[in-house]
Image (cartoon, rainbow, N blue to C red):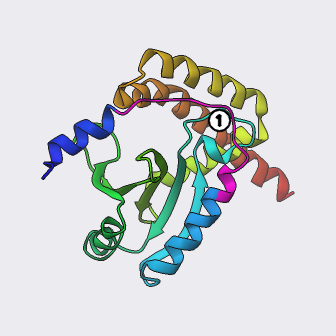
Amino acid sequence: METLKEKIARVVNEEIAVVPYDPRWPQMFAEERRHLFSCLPSDLVKRIEHFGSTAVPGLAAKPIVDMLVEVTSLAETRQRIAPLLEAQGYDYFWRPTWGEATPPFYAWFIKRDQHGSRTHHIHMVEAEFEHWERLLFRDYLIAHPEIAREYGALKQQLAGMYQTDRVAYTQAKTEFIRRITEQAKRFSHDSRWSGSK
């Protein structure tokens, strides 16, 4: 039986590949969204969003669909959702938002295909979690293709540098993501303000 430490080591050292945009990604999201709504407790699961690079048309990405799921209770998610998805073959982790063992924690699932390759990352958080800012980042990249291209080039460079180190790859993207998210917040605020005139 694989220990948690062994499971984490296996997952973080899996190879990183950034590939050209695949127009099937939105359909993969839609199919998984339907599946989750059909099999998970409706009193716990509220909205499900597609985020990350696979949600941005034309953007190169790791071929893994990122999904953000709003749940009413993470404690209930651990008790009621995690066993359901683990029984279906999903990998489950109780994961820190930033850094090692740094709260707040959230429920994270990996779905794989029949060959063992990752197809979906499912992030389950409550409504007040900062993860929802990732939708601003997504929308900003969609609205600003030149920034999306810059981000795609950065990811391809980092994937070459950190081919089997997912932690280092993610950390190396963080400053870019934070900077663009701040721009996205200002853009969103300015757009709302100008729209209210």
Residue 187 in the figure: left or right of residue 181: right
Give the side of residue 144 with respect to residue 101, left or right. right
Quadrant of the rendering where the C terminus is positioned: bottom right
User: Would you say the magenta stretch is mainly helix, strand or loop?
Assistant: loop
Residue at 43% from the left image edge and 78% from the top image edge: 40
Q: Residues within 10 Å of mark 1 (few under 14, many from 20)?
A: some
Identify the residue shown where x is 83% and y is 50%. 194
| Front residue of 134 and 118 | 118
Number of disc labels: 1
Query: What residue appears at the point 27 percent right and 68 percent down from the top-left corner?
Result: 78
Q: Secondary structure at mark 1?
A: helix
Judge whether residue 5 is colored magenta: no
Q: Nearer the viewer, residue 35 or 157?
A: 35
**Relative to 70, is 161 above or below?**
above
Question: Looking at the image, is 23 positioned above or below residue 78?
Answer: above
| Residue 21 drawn in magenta | yes
Quarter of the image for residue 108 reads bottom left
Report the front residue among 99 and 27: 27
Residue 42 in percent (x, y) is at 47, 83
Give residue 52's quadrant in the image. Answer: top right
Does 175 appear above or below 128?
above
Which kind of residue does numbered mark 1 sit on?
Gln
Residue 183 location (% of width, % of height): 65, 35
The magenta region covers 14-27
Q: Which residue is mark 1?
A: 183
Residue 150 location, x and y as percent? 67, 23
